Amino acid sequence: MLAALEAEMSARGHCTTVAACAGSCASGTVLVTGNESSEADRLAERNAEHEARIIGMLRQNGGSRPAFDLIHDKSGSFWRRECEVPVLATLHLPRHFYPAEAFESVPRNVYFNCVSHSQALTFGDLDSVMGVVRNGIRVGQFPFKLEKQDYLLWMGRVCEEKGAHIAIEVAQRTGLPLVLAGQVYPFSYHQNYYNERVRPYLGKSRVSFFETPTLETKTRLLANARALLVPSLVDETSSLVAMEAMACGTPVIGFRRGAIPEVIMDRVTGYVVENTEEMAEAVWQAGDINPHGCRVHVESNYSAQRMAREYEKLYDVVLQFEVERRTAA
């Protein structure tokens, strides 16, 4: 998400800087905040180092004009730190994923946006929520394919909330091969879930697993699948993988959770279902979905260009609010 938006904003003529670990690439400047870490027990330490490096860089200017007009925080935590630059924080997670106290003392220069209307309803008590900007993808990266192969696909973080075990059950009910693709993160509950609920089925019941697939492998799997399954057990605030599949002309079958009914046009680009049984039944109807309609839906509603235009307008609104607030003060 950050990479797609930053590339578009840079293309639109804005000077952009991305705070990220060593080895990261951006269209603009990269502010290196430390080395990458995949160790679960160091993530909090690494995040603190990352944020401290950003604050240190912001303070280098002293009393001169700030180096940035606005900070767009997609991390979910930086906005809690005090800084002089206006901050727009995109809320990517369901409300209950954030600590209860996270929104109790929000700095006055911090503004929020949500990524779906269903998510925005859960943040209705926050006066500083400026609206909704739906996520977008670089559609050109995802090849359209009309003819599909006869396998089901699940793709995402390998953890219980994303429902890989439900995809396995759907495959067993239909008798179709299932391809799982994603990453097992270094958290004990993710690894335990993989070892107990996923790994025993690999190589059996025609279930295969691509761990941390490359972009080439990912797009090939998305383009050729009969359908993408999204059996999430939490209220999704968006679904990038659903957008990516539809961009390839592949229908998506997802549970009616959170923003899934906003992303999938039921019976046009896939099916929104209530449970595992309905998901299995919908698999046999996937051939009724027009692949061209899936592609057009994403081009019209979920492109990175559309997302960048909407964020550009929101940046202007935030900056105007800041001018008015500081003038009033």
Image (cartoon, helix red, strand yellow):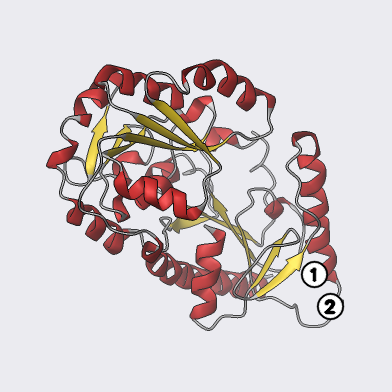
Can I make out residue 224 in this image? yes
200 and 240: which is toward the camera: 200
Horizontal side, residue 40 vs residue 235: left or right: right
Q: Position of residue 144 (x, y in %)?
A: 28, 58
Tell me the residue at 49%/43% (across/down).
Answer: 123
97 and 201: which is toward the camera: 201
Tell me the residue at 75%/77% (across/down).
Answer: 66
**Marking on residue 133:** none
Say if mark 1 contacts mark 2, CB within 8 Å.
yes
Q: Which residue is mark 1?
A: 58
Above-or-below relation of 71 to 256? below
200 and 279: which is toward the camera: 200
Give the amino acid at mark 2: Asn
Q: Which residue is mark 2?
A: 61
The 10 Å Cα crowd at callout 1, few under 14, some 14 to 19, many 20 or more, is some
**SS of the residue at dot 1?**
helix
